[in-house]
Image (tube, grey):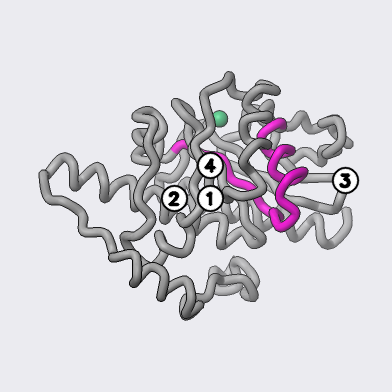
């Protein structure tokens, strides 16, 4: 196995454990992928659990027709992942999961505000909603394909969310920032304490200042000690 592919498998395993540790995924729901090269992706195998993910449980899949290169059968949700890699050239990692508060938003057909805190401004400035279609269907893939180029965060109605980014850390930050924004909205509505959004000029100044730098250059997992 090429060194690069082995490293990607390790990154995906660590991301799966992180999602599980942080209650951002549950059971066998959710799957994740990475771009290997122009024609191939790694995608978690069908029936795998994020919690117990191992590096050999990923399928190498041809982006063109979805066929697997080896014996591991990829997740049936390949069409969504493929739609991202075909339409968003900057996408290197994609994560699909169903965190509780995000799923509440997905089931109430809404998207959270992004002008809440630094991470939400940075990671949630482009959120799309994708209409429900059966998980794994070509229709769901087409729904994602229609918006993937412009929206790195896609709330899947009555299903969950799929995000992508150039690094696995930034993809995780998108999921976790989304879940926090959805949770704050839920708490606000439940408690009757309104959230105060940052004013548009502050949000504009934030985007113009570029003061907040994502984790792009850091090797994922460098501080985790394995
Ligand atoms: Zn799903």
Q: Which quadrant of the structure image shows residue 75?
A: top right
Image spot of residue 210 (x, y percent): 50, 77
Which element type, helix, strand or loop, lies under badge 3? loop
Question: Residue 17: which numbered mark, if any?
Answer: 1
The secondary structure type at the circle numbered 2 is helix
Q: Earlier in the sequence, mark 2 or mark 4?
A: 2
Residue 57 visible: no
For the residues labelled 2 and 4, the Cα–Cα distance comes to: 22 Å
Q: What's the magenta region? A: 79-98
Label 4, label 3: how far apart the Cα atoms are = 23 Å
According to the image, label 2 marks what residue?
Answer: 21
Residue contact between numbered discs 2 and 1, judged by CB atoms under 8 Å: yes
For the point 62% across and 56% down, the residue is: 165
Q: Quarter of the picture for ligand 1?
A: top right
Single out the mark in the foreground, 4 or 1. 4
Pointer 4 residue Cβ closer than 8 Å to ligand 1: no
Picture coordinates of residue 216, whole percent (x, y): 62, 71
């Amino acid at each position: 196995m090429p060194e690069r592919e082995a490293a990607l498998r390790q990154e995906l395993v660590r991301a799966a454990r992180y999602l599980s540790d942080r209650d951002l995924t549950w059971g066998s729901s959710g799957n994740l992928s990475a771009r290997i090269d122009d024609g191939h992706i790694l995608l978690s195998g069908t029936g795998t659990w994020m919690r117990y993910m191992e590096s050999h449980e990923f399928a190498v899949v041809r982006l063109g027709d979805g066929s697997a290169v080896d014996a591991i059968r990829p997740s049936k949700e390949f069409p969504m992942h493929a739609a991202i890699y075909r339409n968003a050239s900057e996408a290197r990692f994609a994560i699909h999961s169903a965190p509780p508060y995000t799923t509440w938003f997905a089931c109430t057909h809404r998207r959270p505000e992004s002008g809440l805190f630094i991470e939400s401004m940075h990671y949630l400035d482009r959120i799309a909603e994708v209409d429900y279609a059966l998980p794994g269907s070509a229709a769901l893939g087409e729904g994602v394909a229609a918006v993937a180029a412009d929206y790195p965060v896609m709330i899947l109605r009555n299903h969950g969310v799929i995000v992508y980014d150039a690094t696995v850390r930034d993809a995780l930050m998108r999921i976790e920032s989304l879940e926090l924004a959805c949770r704050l909205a839920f708490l606000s509505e439940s408690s009757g304490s309104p959230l105060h959004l940052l004013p548009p000029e502050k949000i504009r100044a934030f985007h113009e200042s570029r003061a907040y730098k994502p984790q792009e250059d850091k090797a994922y997992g460098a501080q985790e000690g394995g």
